[in-house]
Image (spheres, grey):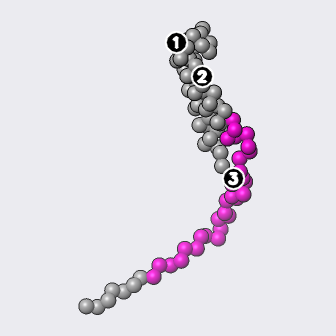
Amino acid sequence: MPKSVVRKKKVYTPPSDINPAVKGASNKPSPVWVPVSAVTLIVVGIGWLVVYYLSSQQWPVASWEYWNLAVGFGCMVASLGLLSRWR
């Protein structure tokens, strides 16, 4: 049986008329405050919700009623926004 012909692929060379994007500015590490504040927001949000439920909806702010849930989950969503910027 005859052997099949092996095809050689051309080596890719990027076009020379396009300038490569600057990578140095986007690869800088995040400041220290980004993960610290994200973890703090997670802890505050979870703590807010736990206190709200364990106190039978009387604490942390009784007059806000169910807006306490928005504060707790808002803290956690804000921390996710910070963590998406962390490098």
Give the Cα distance between marks 3 and 2: 35 Å
x 65%, y 65%: residue:
18
- Residue 75 in view (yes/no): no
At label 1, counting other C-alpha atoms closer than 10 Å, the crowd grade (few under 14, some 14-19, many 20 or more) is few
Q: Are marks 3 and 2 in contact (CB under 8 Å)?
A: no
> To which residue does mark 3 refer?
26
Disc 2 is placed on an element classified as: helix
x 65%, y 68%: residue:
17
Residue toward you, 79 or 59: 59
Query: In the picture shown, does residue 77 fall above or below 49?
Result: below
Q: Can you tell which of label 3 and label 2 is closer to the viewer?
A: 2
Residue kind at label 1, given as amino acid type: Ser
Disc 3 is placed on an element classified as: loop
Disc number placed over residue 56 in the picture, else none? 1
Q: Is residue 64 magenta?
A: no
x 55%, y 14%: residue:
55
Q: Earlier in the sequence, mark 1 or mark 3?
A: 3
Query: In the picture shown, does residue 20 fall above or below 83?
Result: below
Q: Are marks 1 and 3 in contact (CB under 8 Å)?
A: no
At label 3, counting other C-alpha atoms closer than 10 Å, the crowd grade (few under 14, some 14-19, many 20 or more) is few
**Residue 20: image x %, image y %?**
66, 63
Residue kind at label 2, given as amino acid type: Trp
Disc number placed over residue 48 in the picture, else none? 2
Give the Cα distance between marks 1 and 2: 13 Å
Q: Earlier in the sequence, mark 3 or mark 2?
A: 3
**Residue 1: image x %, image y %?**
25, 91
Q: Can you tell which of label 1 and label 3 is closer to the viewer?
A: 1
Residue kind at label 3, given as amino acid type: Ser
Query: In the picture shown, does residue 4 fall above or below 15?
Result: below
Residue toward you, 73 or 44: 44
Residue toward you, 8 or 77: 77
Q: Which residues are magenta?
A: 8-37
